[in-house]
Image: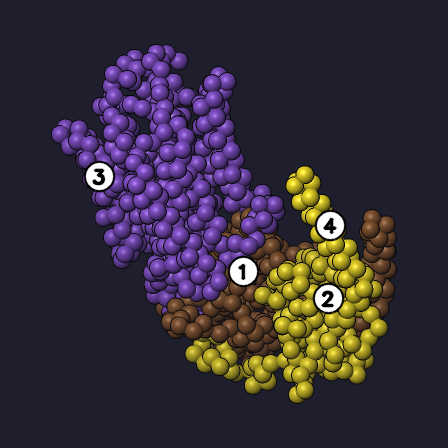
Chain colours: A yellow, B brown, C purple
C-alpha cells in the first residue's frame, strides 16, 4: 500500500516536470539575441531559429572539418561568422566576449550545462586587423563595422612583440 | 519528433548542396580576380594540383635579421602569448610556442657562417603524421602539414618525431587569440604556411613578405608544381638541398647555400 | 599433485586500512597534481618544447613495461608448464593488470587534452604505434582478466593453457609496441633502432619480476606465510638471468651505435660528457640497477639471504626508473643533428647551440603524478589480494610440488 502511494507520487512529480518542461520549451521563443549585436538587426540566423537551436553544434562540427582539412572558408556556417553576428558591444564599442556571462552563447549553454569549449582556442570576439575588418565590411556591404578587438602589435607596428627576441610587449 | 528530424535532415543536405553551388558561382569570379584588392575565401576543397613550398637562400639571409620571425609572430598571433604569473623567464622562453626561428651555423672545417630561418618543412612523408595516434597531424592535399587541433589530444608524440623540431606545445591557457589563428592550451601546432592566407586566396606567407620588404628576398614562396612559378624558377637557378636529406622526406622547404 | 590452497590476505584490519590510507593519500596527491597541471597548463611542469616527455612518462613507461613482465611468472607456469610457478600465477596476473592500470593512468592524465580521451579511443591512425598501443594496452587488461578467470574458476581450468599462451604472445606484442614508440622515431639519434624493442622486452622481464618478488615477499611476510627456498631461489636466479639479458642489449645498442661515426657524439653524451644523464646511466642504471643486484643475487652467501634478495629487487626497480630517465629524457636532451659537420652558433629555438643539451629539471607536479600512478597500482594489488583469493596459503618447499618440471 505504502509502495503504491510512493510510486503514485513519483509518477505525478515526473509528469509535472516533463509537462512543465515541454510547456516551457513551447512557450519559449525566449530571445537570447543580445541588443546591439548585428544579429538583433536581422530576421533570422543562417538557418531558421528552431533548426539552429537543435543543430548548430552539428553544423559547426561539420564545418570545422571542411575548413581544416579542405580549406573551405566561404560558407555561411563559419564560426567566425557566428561570432561576428552575435557579439554585442558596450557603450564605447568594445566587443563583449560572446561566451561571457549573460551573453548569447552563455544563455543556453549555462542552462544546458554544456561547456563551450570552442572558446578555449577560438577568439570569442571578432579579432581582426583594421585591414581585415575593412575588407569584410566592403565585401559584405555592411553598415555595421566591427571595431578592432584588441590593441595588439598590429596597431603598434611590425617591430614590436617578437617572441623570444627580448622585446616582448 | 521523428518527423521533425527527417524533415531537418533532408532540407539540410539539400541546402548545403545548393549553398556550395551558389557559393562557388558567386566566388568563382573573385577567385579568378584574386590579385586585386579583396581576397576571396576558398569554397572548393583543396586539391593536389598545387604543392606549396619555399626556397630559402641562406646567402641572402642577413646576419642579425629576424624580420621573418617577427612577421610570423604578428601574423599568427604568437606575440600575444603571455608568460603566466610566477613562471621563470628562462623556462618560459623554452615553453613559448615559436613557429619559425633563425639559426646561425658554422662549418666545422671551413668556419664559414650561414644564417637561415627554420620552420616546419612540410615533408611529403612527414614523420609527425605517421606517429599521431588520432590522425590530428595530417598533410593537406596541397602539401601543407598541419595539426587539426579539434582532434589533437596533446600527447606530443609528433614533437618527439619531428626531425626538425618544428612543433610547439601550448603550455598555458591562451587569453587573447586572433580570429584567423585559433590557439589553445594543450594542443600542438607548427608553421602552416599561413594557411589562412592560402584559403583566403592571398599569394604569399608573412615571412616571405617580410623578407622581401627588408630587401633580402631570401625566402621565395610558391607552388612547387608550377614550372613557371617563382619557386621552381628559383630552384632552377640555384643548387639546393633539403635539410636532413638522408631521411628522404621530400620536404617542401628547400635550402640553398647551406 | 598437491592441491594449492589460495586464501585472502589476512593482515590485521588496522594495518591493512593503514596501508590503504597511505596508498590512497599518495594516489590522491597524484590526482591533485594532475588537476593542477590540467588547469594551469603544462607550464607548471619542467617539460618544454625541447623535452616534451618528462617524469610522468618515465614512471608511466616503467609501469607499463613492468606490467607485461609481471605476467611472466604466470606464463612460465601455463605456457612452459613449470609446476612450481603455478601457485604464483594468480598474483602475477593481478600485478600485471594493476601495474598497467597505474601506468596508463599516469600516461592519460599527462595528456595536453585529457578531456579528449574518448577521441583517442575512437579515432585511430594505424600508422602510429601509439594507436596500436591503445588497443594493445586495453586488450592486455581484458586478456589477463580472462586468464585470471580461467585460473580461478574450476570450469575455466581447461582453458588456462590456451588463454595463457594467448596472453603471453599479447604481452610480447605489447612490450614490442612500447619499445617501438622510441624505436620507430627516425628523428632522434638515441632512438631509430630496432634493438629497442627486444631491449624493452628484456627490461620488462627484469623489472616485472623484481616488482613481483618484492610484492610477494612483502605480502607473505606480513601474513606469516612461508616462502620456501625452492620457489624463492628459482625466482632469484631468473631475475639474475634477465638482468644479464638487459646488459646484453645495452651492450649491443652501444656497440652498434659506436660503429657509425655520426653517433660518436651520442655515445660520448651517454657514456662520458652528458652531465646528469651520464651519472644516472652509470651509477643509477648500470651500477645500482644491474651490476650490484647481479652481485647480490649470485653471491654464495648474500644470494641466500632474504633481505639481500629484497634489496636487490629494490635496486633493480630504481635502476629501471633510471633507465627510463636516461632513455626517454636523455634521448630528448641530446641535441638533434640538423646540420652534421656544422656547429650551431645561435638559434631562436634551442637547437643545441654549441652542442648544448636541452635543459630539463623534474618538477613536483610531475613527480607526484608519477608516484601517484605507482600508488594506484599498489592500491589495486592490495585490495585484490585482500578481497579475493590471489595468494597461495604457502610456498614452503613441502607444499610446492617437488617434481620440478612437467614433461611438455
Residue B106 at what x, y percent from top left? Answer: 39, 67
Residue B127 at what x, y percent from top left? Answer: 53, 51
Q: Residue lying farthest front?
A: A1
Instruction: Check disc 3: other Cα within 10 Å, few if <14, some if 14-19, many if 20+.
Output: some
Residues at marks 1 and 3, CA–CA distance in whole angstroms = 42 Å
B59 lies left or right of C329: right
The reply to whether dot 3 and dot 4 touch (C-beta < 8 Å) is no
According to the image, label 2 marks what residue? A78
According to the image, label 1 marks what residue? B187
Whether labels 3 and 4 belong to a single chain: the reply is no
Q: Residue at x 32, y 38 (%)?
A: C13
Q: Which chain is home to disc 4?
A: A
**Callout 4: helix, strand or loop?**
helix
According to the image, label 3 marks what residue? C311
According to the image, label 4 marks what residue? A12
Residues at marks 2 and 3, CA–CA distance in whole angstroms = 63 Å
Q: Residue at x 45, y 77 (%)?
A: A165
Amino acid at each position: 500500500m505504502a509502495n503504491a502511494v510512493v510510486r503514485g507520487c513519483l509518477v505525478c512529480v515526473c509528469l509535472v516536470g516533463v509537462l512543465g518542461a515541454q510547456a516551457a520549451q513551447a512557450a519559449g521563443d525566449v530571445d537570447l539575441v543580445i541588443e546591439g549585436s548585428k544579429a538583433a538587426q536581422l530576421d533570422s540566423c543562417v538557418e531558421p531559429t528552431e533548426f539552429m537551436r537543435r543543430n548548430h553544434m552539428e553544423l559547426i562540427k561539420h564545418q570545422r572539418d571542411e575548413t581544416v582539412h579542405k580549406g573551405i572558408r566561404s560558407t555561411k556556417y563559419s564560426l567566425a561568422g557566428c561570432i561576428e553576428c552575435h557579439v554585442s558591444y558596450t557603450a564605447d564599442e568594445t566587443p563583449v566576449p560572446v561566451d561571457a556571462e549573460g551573453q548569447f552563447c552563455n544563455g543556453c549553454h549555462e542552462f544546458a550545462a554544456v561547456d563551450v569549449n570552442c572558446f578555449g582556442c577560438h577568439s570569442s570576439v571578432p579579432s581582426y586587423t583594421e585591414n581585415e575588418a575593412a575588407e569584410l565590411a566592403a565585401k559584405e556591404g555592411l553598415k555595421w563595422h566591427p571595431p578592432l578587438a584588441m590593441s595588439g602589435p598590429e596597431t603598434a607596428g611590425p617591430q614590436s612583440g617578437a617572441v623570444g627576441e627580448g622585446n616582448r610587449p | 519528433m521523428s518527423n521533425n528530424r527527417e524533415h531537418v535532415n533532408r532540407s539540410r543536405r539539400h541546402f548545403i548542396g545548393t549553398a556550395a553551388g551558389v557559393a562557388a558561382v558567386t566566388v568563382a569570379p573573385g577567385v579568378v580576380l584574386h590579385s586585386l584588392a579583396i581576397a576571396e575565401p576558398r569554397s572548393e576543397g583543396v586539391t593536389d594540383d598545387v604543392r606549396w613550398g619555399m626556397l630559402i637562400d641562406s646567402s641572402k639571409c642577413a646576419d642579425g635579421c629576424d624580420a621573418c620571425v617577427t612577421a610570423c609572430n604578428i601574423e599568427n598571433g604568437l606575440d600575444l602569448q603571455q608568460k603566466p604569473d610566477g613562471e621563470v623567464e628562462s623556462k618560459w622562453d623554452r615553453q613559448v610556442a615559436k613557429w619559425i626561428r633563425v639559426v646561425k651555423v658554422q662549418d666545422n672545417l671551413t668556419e664559414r657562417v650561414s644564417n637561415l630561418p627554420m620552420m616546419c618543412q612540410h615533408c611529403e612523408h612527414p614523420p609527425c603524421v605517421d606517429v599521431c595516434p588520432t590522425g590530428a597531424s595530417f598533410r593537406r592535399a596541397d602539401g601543407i602539414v598541419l595539426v587539426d587541433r579539434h582532434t589533437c589530444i596533446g600527447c606530443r608524440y609528433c614533437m618527439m618525431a619531428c626531425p626538425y623540431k618544428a612543433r610547439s606545445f601550448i603550455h598555458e591557457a591562451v587569453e587573447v587569440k586572433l580570429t584567423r589563428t585559433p590557439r589553445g592550451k594543450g594542443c600542438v601546432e607548427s608553421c602552416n604556411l599561413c594557411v589562412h592566407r592560402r584559403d583566403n586566396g592571398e599569394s604569399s606567407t608573412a615571412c616571405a613578405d617580410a623578407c622581401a620588404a627588408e630587401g633580402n628576398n631570401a625566402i621565395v614562396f610558391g607552388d612547387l608544381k608550377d614550372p613557371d612559378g617563382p619557386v621552381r624558377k628559383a630552384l632552377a637557378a640555384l643548387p639546393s638541398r633539403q635539410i636532413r636529406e638522408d631521411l628522404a622526406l621530400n620536404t617542401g622547404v628547400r635550402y640553398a647555400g647551406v | 599433485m598437491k592441491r594449492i590452497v589460495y586464501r585472502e590476505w589476512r593482515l590485521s584490519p588496522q594495518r591493512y586500512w593503514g596501508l590503504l590510507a597511505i596508498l590512497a593519500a599518495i594516489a590522491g596527491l597524484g590526482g591533485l597534481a594532475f588537476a593542477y597541471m590540467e588547469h594551469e597548463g603544462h607550464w607548471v611542469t619542467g617539460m618544454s618544447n625541447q623535452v616534451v616527455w618528462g617524469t610522468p612518462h618515465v614512471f608511466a613507461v616503467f609501469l607499463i613495461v613492468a606490467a607485461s613482465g609481471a605476467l611472466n611468472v604466470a606464463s612460465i607456469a601455463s605456457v612452459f608448464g613449470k609446476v612450481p610457478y603455478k601457485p604464483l600465477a594468480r598474483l602475477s596476473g593481478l600485478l600485471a593488470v594493476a601495474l598497467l592500470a597505474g601506468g596508463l593512468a599516469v600516461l592519460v592524465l599527462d595528456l595536453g587534452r585529457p578531456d579528449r580521451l574518448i577521441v583517442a579511443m575512437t579515432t585511430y591512425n594505424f600508422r602510429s604505434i601509439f594507436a596500436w598501443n591503445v588497443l594493445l594496452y586495453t586488450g592486455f587488461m581484458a586478456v589477463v582478466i580472462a586468464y585470471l578467470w580461467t585460473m580461478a574458476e574450476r570450469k575455466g581450468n581447461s582453458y588456462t593453457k590456451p588463454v595463457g599462451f594467448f596472453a603471453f604472445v599479447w604481452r610480447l606484442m605489447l612490450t614490442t609496441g612500447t619499445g617501438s614508440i622510441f624505436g620507430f622515431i627516425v628523428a632522434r639519434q638515441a632512438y631509430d633502432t630496432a634493438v629497442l624493442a627486444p631491449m624493452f622486452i628484456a627490461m620488462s622481464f627484469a623489472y616485472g619480476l623484481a616488482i613481483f618478488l618484492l610484492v610477494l615477499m612483502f605480502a607473505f611476510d606480513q601474513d606469516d606465510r612461508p616462502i620456501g627456498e625452492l620457489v624463492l631461489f628459482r625466482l632469484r636466479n631468473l631475475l639474475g638471468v634477465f638482468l644479464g639479458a638487459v646488459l646484453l642489449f645495452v651492450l649491443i645498442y652501444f656497440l652498434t651505435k659506436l660503429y657509425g661515426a655520426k653517433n660518436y657524439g651520442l655515445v660520448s653524451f651517454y657514456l662520458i660528457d652528458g652531465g646528469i644523464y651520464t651519472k644516472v646511466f652509470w651509477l643509477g642504471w648500470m651500477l645500482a640497477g644491474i651490476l650490484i643486484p647481479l652481485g647480490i643475487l649470485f653471491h654464495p652467501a648474500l644470494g641466500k639471504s632474504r633481505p639481500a634478495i629484497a634489496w636487490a629487487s629494490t635496486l633493480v626497480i630504481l635502476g629501471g626508473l633510471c633507465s627510463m630517465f636516461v632513455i626517454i629524457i636523455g634521448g630528448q636532451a641530446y641535441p638533434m643533428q640538423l646540420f652534421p659537420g656544422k656547429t650551431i652558433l645561435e638559434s631562436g629555438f634551442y637547437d643545441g647551440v654549441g652542442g648544448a643539451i636541452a635543459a630539463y629539471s623534474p618538477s613536483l607536479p610531475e613527480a607526484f603524478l608519477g608516484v601517484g600512478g605507482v600508488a594506484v597500482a599498489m592500491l589495486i594489488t592490495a585490495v585484490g589480494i585482500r578481497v579475493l583469493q590471489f595468494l597461495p596459503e604457502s610456498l614452503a618447499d613441502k607444499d610446492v610440488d617437488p617434481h620440478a618440471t612437467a614433461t611438455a
